């Protein structure tokens, strides 16, 4: 069966998901997380990528990103994956693919789903029952938004000003926005952002499909 074509548009924002090959763990130690995060930062700058939200899970990653050009999305992920696989295989005596052969890219309507998708990404460790609160997880962008640490990886979500004209208030509202979702995760009714190819308003989805 032929692969489905990626949905790419000018100035698109994408929720990117990549998993370890056969869902194998990719990160076995703190050093593995640090190494990948360093690669991610270098690749972001090399390929002109804005990273608004991210999380590194033991066997997969989530990124909410905006490439400078449509072609940069695949170049960014290919460069990142090749560099990491080379290091991973050498360190652990492996051969072949460390990651699945094809990453997922989900187009996000920034005006209606940007903050919701960022929240979904940063709550993954809670959803996986690794932690009870996203601030407890070291390998995500939540700590930056929670003003716990400065993370040079993060480009502030450009929808934050819609919450308040004041940055501190924006971050406070966003933290509360994330925390109010935690009980829904435990109840199994939280919103997911990994099942469709496009997330957005009906008008946005129709516009994209018509353009394609």
Image: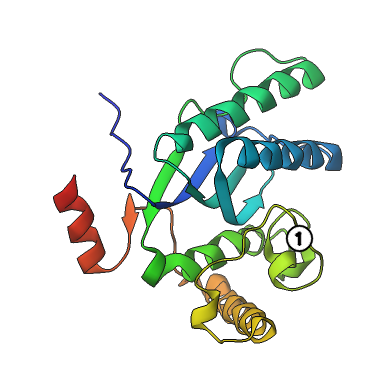
> What coloring was used for the rendering?
rainbow
Which residue is the extreme one toward the left?
Answer: 210
For mark 1, does the 10 Å Cα neighbourhood hold few (<14), some (14 to 19), or many (20 or more) residues? many
Residue position marked by numbered label 1 in the rendering: 137
**Quadrant where the image shows the N terminus:** top left
Q: How many marks?
A: 1
26 sits to left or right of 109: right
> Quadrant location of residue 125?
bottom right
Q: Does 82 sit above or below residue 8?
A: above
Q: Residue at x 42, y 44 (%)?
A: 105
Q: Does 119 sit above or below residue 22?
A: below
Q: Does 83 sit above or below residue 8?
A: above
Residue 195 position in % (x across, y down): 37, 53
Relative to the observer, which residue lies in front, 24 or 180? 180
Q: Residue at x 52, y 68 (%)?
A: 158
**Quadrant where the image shows the C terminus:** top left
Relative to the observer, which residue lies in front, 184 or 167? 167
170 sits to left or right of 86: left
Looking at the image, can residue 103 be seen?
A: no
Q: Residue at x 57, y 86 (%)?
A: 165
Residue 129 position in % (x across, y down): 67, 61
Looking at the image, can residue 18 be seen?
A: yes
Q: Does 102 sit above or below residue 148?
A: above
Residue 157 position in % (x across, y down): 56, 66
> Quadrant location of residue 176?
bottom right
Residue 126 position in % (x across, y down): 65, 64
SS class, disc 1: loop
Relative to the observer, which residue lies in front, 176 or 52? 52
């Amino acid at each position: 069966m032929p692969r489905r074509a990626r949905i790419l548009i000018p100035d698109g924002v994408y929720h990117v998901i990549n998993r370890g090959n056969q869902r194998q763990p990719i990160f076995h130690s703190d050093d593995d997380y640090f190494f990948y995060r360093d690669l991610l930062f270098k690749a972001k700058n090399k390929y002109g990528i804005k990273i608004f939200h991210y999380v590194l899970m033991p066997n997969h990653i989530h990124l909410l990103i905006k490439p400078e050009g449509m072609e940069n999305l695949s170049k960014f992920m290919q460069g990142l994956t090749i560099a990491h696989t080379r290091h991973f295989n050498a360190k652990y005596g492996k051969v072949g693919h460390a990651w699945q052969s094809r990453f997922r890219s989900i187009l996000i309507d920034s005006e209606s789903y940007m903050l919701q998708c960022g929240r979904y990404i940063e709550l993954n460790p809670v959803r996986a029952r690794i932690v009870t609160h996203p601030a407890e997880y070291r390998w995500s962008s939540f700590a930056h938004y929670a003003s716990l640490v400065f993370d040079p990886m993060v480009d502030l979500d450009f929808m934050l000003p819609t919450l308040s004209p004041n940055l501190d208030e924006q971050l406070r509202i966003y933290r509360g926005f994330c925390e109010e979702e935690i009980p829904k995760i435990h109840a199994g009714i939280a919103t997911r952002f990994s099942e469709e190819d496009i997330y957005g308003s009906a008008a946005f989805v129709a516009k994209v499909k018509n353009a394609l």
